[in-house]
Image (cartoon, helix red, strand yellow):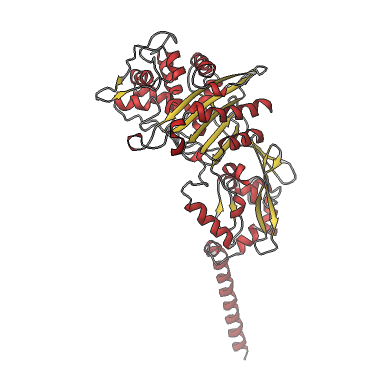
């Protein structure tokens, strides 16, 4: 009898060991598989059991959380959603996150270990930290001026502070209301399908995720390359540029929209945007120096994040001399985001130094204590300080007596460059209207803002499309908002 009891006890012990081994297998070995199983709703329920941290502009939250009383309890809300959508992105129970909501998701959701004063205690208790807050660099008045200036046009605006790289405005139109995607209802599904099927792509952030041919605004880069290389030494000397200019090795003749470009000085050519002069300048500088200058401004950089990723602006270094001529006037394969062109204007305003742009000023815990700050941003030299000083002079001339007169601001010095970029097969597409600029108030020690505006004109207003006519007034409104703040 005792032997049978011992056998039963041993068998029970073996069963207990088997249960423990299986429990360990499920909880340790197979845990990731169960966590990632679509049928497992526990991670989602835990994620939405508390309010999400907020994104702030000018010290005020532009996001919030709404208690739905359902299993996925808290749903994201947005103040002035379409205005700030190119910054916040969306946080959806059904479709995940985008832009700042995605880049700072760990902090906003409370999952970031930096939020926990005692991380090991949370591991033991299973407690969750309250979501932290993200303070942006955005100037609310500048953001609204850019949004209202673009109105019903497709386009984008990027504005930065030249001395720091702080992004002051980031607007893309048409926009959308991210709150309509926050939940997991059929209405959210219909909105998702509608937005993704819209040919105008309202969820595309044109300011940082779309590249355009920059057209004549790229002549700022070409001028910097020519001055740094010593190809041009006197701003007022004739440049020996024919009009029309036959691109090297071809029969293609490049012409100008303005008169008086034959042998124009660099100052005249810059003020009236002579294609022939700048195409020849690019060829004279050569592809190596042109590419080096473009890359110093930020072109061909695939690693820029603000903190979400920015599309790479490109300057093709594998070109022949004819293609180089077109690239030097912002055509051929030259493409740029509006943020990149704002960086070009900022480099001129900042004495030739490019500050890396950033969108997050600091992050905080729910109680207000600091998690991290942006700190000082690295710089690189895009051009010599003397070259930047001469470019400031040229850009000021564009506004005072050239094609950028619509950007002039009373009580401030404004420098600018217009551009009308052709695109499409045989330039059949509706041109893009560009304007890049910087502004310094009469009482300021340095320029306070640099702006890039691109407007995708419609076929109906094709004849009226110009950087000076469509884009410059928008840039002026943004610069005024910053100067007045």
Give the image location of residue 407, x and y in percent. Answer: 56, 24
- Residue 94 placement: quadrant: bottom right
Quadrant location of the N terminus? Answer: bottom right
Task: Mark yes or no: residue 342 visible.
Answer: no
User: At 31% across and 19% down in the image, what residue appears?
Assistant: 244
352 or 430, nearer to the observer: 430
Task: Mark yes or no: residue 240 visible.
Answer: yes
Is 337 positioned to the left or the right of 422 in the image? right
Q: Residue furthest bottom?
A: 1
Q: Is residue 476 depicted above or below 110 in this figure?
A: above
User: At 53% across and 55% down in the image, what residue appears?
Assistant: 192
Q: Is residue 77 depicted above or below 409 in this figure?
A: below
Is 461 positioned to the left or the right of 131 in the image? left
244 or 88, nearer to the observer: 244
Q: Residue furthest right?
A: 367
Give the image location of residue 378, x and y in percent. Answer: 55, 28
Q: Is residue 169 depicted above or below 74 in this figure?
A: above
Quadrant location of the C terminus? Answer: top right
């Amino acid at each position: 009898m005792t032997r049978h009891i011992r056998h039963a006890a041993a068998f029970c012990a073996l069963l207990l060991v088997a249960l423990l081994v299986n429990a360990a297998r499920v909880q340790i070995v197979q845990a990731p598989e169960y966590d990632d199983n679509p049928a497992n709703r526990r991670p989602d329920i835990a994620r939405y059991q508390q309010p999400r941290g907020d994104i702030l502009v000018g010290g005020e939250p532009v996001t919030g959380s709404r208690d739905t009383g359902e299993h996925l309890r808290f749903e994201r809300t947005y103040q002035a959603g379409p205005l700030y959508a190119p910054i916040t992105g969306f946080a959806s129970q059904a479709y995940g996150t985008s832009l700042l909501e995605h880049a700072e998701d760990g902090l906003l959701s409370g999952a970031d270990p930096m939020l926990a004063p005692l991380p090991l205690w949370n591991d033991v208790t299973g407690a969750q930290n309250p979501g932290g807050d993200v303070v942006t660099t955005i100037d609310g008045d500048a953001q609204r001026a850019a949004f209202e200036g673009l109105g019903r046009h497709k386009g984008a605006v990027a504005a930065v502070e030249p001395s720091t790289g702080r992004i002051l405005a980031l607007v893309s139109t048409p926009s959308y209301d991210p709150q309509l995607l926050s939940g997991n209802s059929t209405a959210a599904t219909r909105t998702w399908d509608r937005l993704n099927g819209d040919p105008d792509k309202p969820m595309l952030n044109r300011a940082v995720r779309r590249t355009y041919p920059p057209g004549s605004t790229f002549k700022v880069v070409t001028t910097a390359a020519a001055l740094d290389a010593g190809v041009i030494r006197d701003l007022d000397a004739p440049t020996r540029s024919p009009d029309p200019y036959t691109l090297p090795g071809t029969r293609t003749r490049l012409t100008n929209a303005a008169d008086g470009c034959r042998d124009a000085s660099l100052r005249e050519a810059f003020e009236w945007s002579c294609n022939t002069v700048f195409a020849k300048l690019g060829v004279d500088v050569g592809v190596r120096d042109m590419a080096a200058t473009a890359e110093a401004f930020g072109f061909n950089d695939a690693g820029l994040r603000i903190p979400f990723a920015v599309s790479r602006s490109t300057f093709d270094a594998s070109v022949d001399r004819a293609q180089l001529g077109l690239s030097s006037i912002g055509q051929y394969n030259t493409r740029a985001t509006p943020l990149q062109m704002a960086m070009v204007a900022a480099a001129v305003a900042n004495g030739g130094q490019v500050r890396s742009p950033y969108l997050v000023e600091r992050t905080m815990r729910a109680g207000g204590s600091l998690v991290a700050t942006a700190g000082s941003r690295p710089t690189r030299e895009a051009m010599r300080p003397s070259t930047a000083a001469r470019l400031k002079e040229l850009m000021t001339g564009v506004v005072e007596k050239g094609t950028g007169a619509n950007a002039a601001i009373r009580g401030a010095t404004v420098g600018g460059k217009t551009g009308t970029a052709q695109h499409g097969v045989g330039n059949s597409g509706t041109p893009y209207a560009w304007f890049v600029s910087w502004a310094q108030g009469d009482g300021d020690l340095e320029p306070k803002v640099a702006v890039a505006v691109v407007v995708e004109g419609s076929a109906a207003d094709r004849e009226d499309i110009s950087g000076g006519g469509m884009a410059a007034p928008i840039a002026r409104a943004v610069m005024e908002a910053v100067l007045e703040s």
